[in-house]
Every structure is written in C-alpha cells, then in structure tokens.
Amino acid sequence: DRRLKSNIQDISTSKISLLKDINPVTFNNGDIGFIAQDFEHSVSELVTTDDNGYLALKYSKITAILWKQNQELLERIERLECILAKIQSK
C-alpha cells in the first residue's frame, strides 16, 4: 500500500543488467533459482548473510528489478518498431 511507504523512487537499472549477466540455474535435484554470489557485487541490497556466513537472495526484490528491466526492453522495442515502420513506409 502506497500509504505505508515513504521516499518512493523509480528503480534505476542503467548499471544493472541482471537479464544479461546473471543466469538462472537448477540445483539440488530440481530446485530452480540463482546463486547469491552472482548478485553480491552488482546488486548487494538483494543479498543477505546469515550467522554462519551463508548468502541468501531476497527473491521478492528481484522481481521489481526484472520488471523494470522488462519495461525498459519494451520501450526499446517500441522505438525500434517505430523506426522500422518509418523505413518501410518510404
């Protein structure tokens, strides 16, 4: 709820390229996910460390970043489609 949040800002993903740089993996005979160390340097706010030093991902936060990156990709596609339409109409 917007009423429960403060200091709301858009996510900037210009320096983050999760879709390109980080690969989803399978592990432990059928689980699907990511490796926390792959996120550690580029988006450290998505990684936590437990008392034993093991890393874990905040998967719910990954969704927002991926959503933003998809929005940016859609904008690029739309721009390219406009350029292509102009070229084809000549």
Image (cartoon, rainbow, N blue to C red):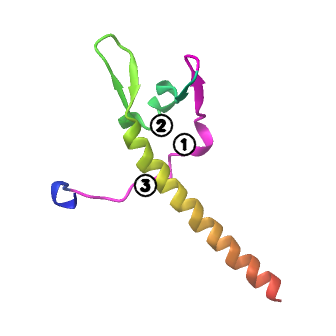
Tag 2: residue type? Ser
Q: Amino acid at mark 1?
A: Leu
Q: Which residue carries the number 3 mark?
A: 12
Residue 56 picture quarter: top left
Q: Which residue is mark 2?
A: 42
Quarter placement of the N terminus: bottom left
Task: Determine whether, in the image, residue 7 is placed left or right of residue 17.
Answer: left
Query: Of label 1 and label 2, which has the lower sequence position?
Result: 1
Any magenta on residue 86?
Answer: no
Q: Residues within 10 Å of mark 1 (few under 14, many from 20)?
A: some
Q: From what the image shows, is residue 22 above or below residue 7?
A: above
Q: Position of residue 2 (x, y in %)?
A: 22, 60
Residue contact at pointers 1 and 2, CB within 8 angstroms: yes
> Which comes before the other along the chain, label 3 or label 1?
3
Q: Residue at x 62, y 43 (%)?
A: 20
Q: Secondary structure at mark 3?
A: loop
User: Eyeballing the image, is 45 above or below 68?
Assistant: above
Q: Nearer the viewer, residue 43 or 61?
A: 61
In three-dimensional space, the C-alpha distance between marks 2 and 3, rounded to whole angstroms, equals 13 Å
Tell me whether the residue at label 3 lies in contact with that at label 1, contact meaning CB atoms closer than 8 angstroms. no
